[in-house]
Image (spheres, rainbow, N blue to C red):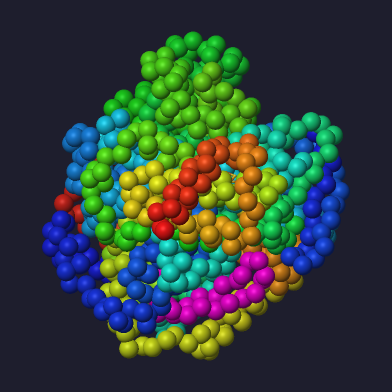
Amino acid sequence: MNLDAKIPEGSLEQKWENFKKTAKLVNPANRKKLEVIVVGTGLAGSSIAASLAEMGYQVKAFCFQDSPRRAHSVAAQGGVNAAKNYKNDGDSVYRMFVDTLKGGDFRAREANVYRMAECSLNLIDQAVAQGVPFSREYGGYLNNRSFGGVQVSRTFYARGQTGQQLLLGAYQALMRQVGKGAVKLYSRHEMLDLVLVDGKARGIIVRNLDTGVLERHAGHAVILATGGYGKIYYLSTLAMGCNGSAIWRAHKKGALMASPSWIQIHPTSLPQSGDYQSKLTLMSESLRNDGRIWVPLNTGETRKPNDIPENERDYYLERRYPAFGNLAPRDISSRAAKERIDAGFGIGPLKNAVYLDFAKAIKEQGRAKIEEKYGNLFDMYRKITGFDAYEEPMMISPSAHFSMGGLWVDYELMTTVPGLFALGEANFADHGANRLGANSLLQASVDGYFIAPYTVANYLSGDIHTGKIDDQHPAFDKAQEAVEANLRKLLAIAGNKTVDYYHKTLGKILYDYCGLARNEAGLKGAIVEIRKLREDFYKNVKIPGDSITMNSELEKAGRVSDYLEIGELMCFDALSRNESCGAHFREEYQTAEGEAMRNDAEFQFISAWEWAGADADPVLHKEELTFEVLKPIVRSYK
Amino acid sequence: MKLNLKIWRQKDRESQGKLVDYVLEDLNPHMSFLEMLDTLNERLILTGDEPVEFDHDCREGICGQCGMMINGIAHGPLQNTTTCQLHLRSFTDNETIFIEPFRSQAFPIKRDLRVDRSAFDRIISSGGFVSTNTGQAPDAHALPVSHQVTEEAFDAAACIGCGACVATCKNSSAALFTSAKINHLVLLPQGKEERQERVIRMVEQMDAEEFGHCSNTEACEVECPQGISVLNIARMNYEYNRALTRRK
Ligand SMILES: Cc1cc2nc3c(=O)[nH]c(=O)nc-3n(C[C@H](O)[C@H](O)[C@H](O)COP(=O)(O)OP(=O)(O)OC[C@H]3O[C@@H](n4cnc5c(N)ncnc54)[C@H](O)[C@@H]3O)c2cc1C
Ligand code: SF4
Ligand code: FES
């Protein structure tokens, strides 16, 4: 298969302009004849659905929550990046491009990354116009802070609820179009399959989660904006319903999956406290601006943190990475934490955490200042743990957080299935092997507001004579029958273990063998274990109830059955990449000091995997990466 | 610890519901309230019963999807805390806990503890937005907005749309929710343009959804997880009357 990324001609600065200049348009009279299906109402989904409806297309929007406003974008705390250079500290589109490409360890496309940085300028304008209350300085202008992995202040934020406020902006734009009848909204509907007619994406099969009824929806194009699948690890910072099912079912219909094993493990979440635990709450990375990370210098330390004197503490990030210190990028910080924890220096009841200490910041800036910056995070910490972080250091630990991998898309955000687009976290495009903090709210938003409106129109221009897509086409019958059969199959197993048991077991395998550190033997073993677990699932899972009423367990079972396949692909992906880059750290490929060793000569490509059937190994395709502007260098944060 | 639960079970919108007793033992006090329900469900599934349906997603207090009446209090005993952020350490050993859905004419029960809050979406779609299309925005710095106004707007915008205010109100009024959005937008210069139309449409939609009228009991603020202030309701009433007089 030839993977053509369709990068436009011209210099880096001209590529997006050139695309827009030559992209085909659809005239307003034709737009209302064209229907677009948008699955997902997070930042990416709401923004594209609203934007397309504003342009005059017929849009249907789907989400599994009971309101679009609850998509998991809502949970992003820290902020959103834009190269506005309002701080006059040397920022620019180019600088942001460099930081992002370097942060991603040179495993992303130059052209995509540059375009994201370029469009960042418009996003802030757009959000402010919608009424997003970004933090402001006393003079009335927008405030910025700096986020991990960069040396300028380009992060815009709305207290610790930036994702919520950005999403509400997009949600309100969406609801405005719903009110006008330009978007039909289907909350509590889950996509269970993609329908292809003559090789093109022409519709979806969904299940109404309140009634159990299956529905078919047809359109000229299908856009998946279904978010990340980091919940595959069970314990993660994602919401309970986050899933990989929409993209996975599209994958099985022919869309390639890129870099599935590149999952970011966030350094600052709350540690697990027991087996019953269902999620790990994120403590925003912004805390690292003022908090200092340390572990005791001695193993077996029993004193309370405040009783451990300064010279018996190991501020390991400051020690190992003096230039960036506590602001070292996520992959590096998480791995450094794991290194200390594995070496026996972990703290807390389960010895699975490190300290994040604000004593110095409180002493220097005063408690009031810290309260203003992070008050809601400190409150959240107290609610969850019962401890007061103004008085003693927080306990934090790494947790699965963001999937850099996802459906392979070209520059136009189209997958390998014509007419099927993937936006936001669901695609793999802009973050390379490691996503920089505050870049993904940005990516999800610019995909939806500023990129897909052009590229989807470019595709739809070929469909103005197609006419309405018929949902009675045999392809819809076949897809619906397959979905029904699958639901029946799951319900018929009637075993003796719950769905959560399988999800937790899979999560543990992935944390151990395909998490922060990977090696060949571990990955090979994990593939065997996952296959066994999957087999066991189809023999012994127990799902109560039926498929014709509301049934949360059945929903979960569908998602976990997909995770059991995605997990296997992740291991194949990690196994095939004999280098360390970004979040992908292969223990065999490290320097004497334990730093990642990239191998540009052999692995300067994107891995895009093709589904070859349930019993066959996946097939690898490569998209070579070329760097014309920025030559790959070794990332150093020392 | 041990808990005696009395949980509302109802098959669907039409069926009659009732409280059913469950006893859970050996619970860890650091468990969250929803993890306690997970534990119960795990047991129900394995013994061949149907698990309790309840709403939840983010489990970090921000999506607004969770929410139930716990001992008659929306989101339970802790102030400014959603159900998912509540932990068992807020209860005592051997306590009896009543768990019921958010009840209101405008929030029909779907099953067990799940209710239909789509009325909130319809209130927003009636006018809870700034009418700006993608691409129309001027530079973000074109209009300075003072720090204080932004903070006030944020305080209102922080609403998570959970519906606790409605559930706790004896009139089932949605005044706190609706006023929070109206004030978020009217405080900012970007939202001023549509000030009149917006408040009229949103208040009319709120009435059409069969929410009750606000009689200023202020119970909503007490149980709102985001601490949205009842002053928003006063401002909404001012905005509404202002709009009515100007419309004439
Ligand atoms: C706790 C947390 C904090 C974060 N903080 C930051 C931050 O500070 N800055 C930053 O830049 N990024 C942050 N991120 C990352 C960022 O929030 C996400 O990458 C981004 O919001 C993803 O947006 P999205 O639109 O792609 O997906 P989402 O917002 O996850 O939306 C997914 C949508 O798809 C729907 N959906 C999924 N599957 C189906 C299906 N099968 N059928 C129907 N609908 C479906 C869902 O209902 C939902 O509407 C954070 C992430 C987390 C988890
Ligand atoms: S005003 Fe408060 S209680 Fe009401 S929906 Fe908003 S957050 Fe929930
Ligand atoms: S589950 Fe999201 S607020 Fe409780």
Can I make out residue A586 in this image?
Answer: no
Relative to B69, is B247 above or below? below
Q: Quadrant of the C terminus of chain B?
A: bottom left
| Magenta span contains residue A217 | yes
Rendering coords of residue B147 (x, y %)? 34, 33
Instruction: Determine the residue positioned at 53% across, 14% down.
Output: A306
Which residue occupies the foreground of this view, A4 or B230?
B230
- The percent coordinates of residue A179 (x first, y second) are 46, 66
Residue at figure coordinates x 28%, y 50% from the top left? A125
- The image shows a total of numbered marks equal to 0
Who's the residue at 62% across and 76% down the image? Answer: A214
Is residue A189 in the magenta section? no
Q: Nearer the viewer, residue A471 or A151?
A: A471
Q: Nearer the viewer, residue A493 or A8?
A: A8
Q: Is residue A362 left or right of residue A99?
A: right
Answer left or right for A192 relative to A364: right
Q: Confirm whether residue B112 shows in the render.
A: yes
| A348, above or below A443, in the image | above
Label the magenta part by its dominant secondary structure: strand
Say which quarter of the image contains residue A139.
top left
Residue A215 screen position, x and y as percent? 58, 77
Q: Provide residue A294's location: percent of width, then percent of height.
A: 46, 23
Residue occupying image coordinates x 31% and y 67%: A453
Residue A600 or B172: which is nearer the viewer?
B172
What's the magenta region? A201-223
| Quadrant location of the N terminus of chain B in the rendered image | top right
Instruction: Check the image and report above or below for A174 versus A182.
Output: above
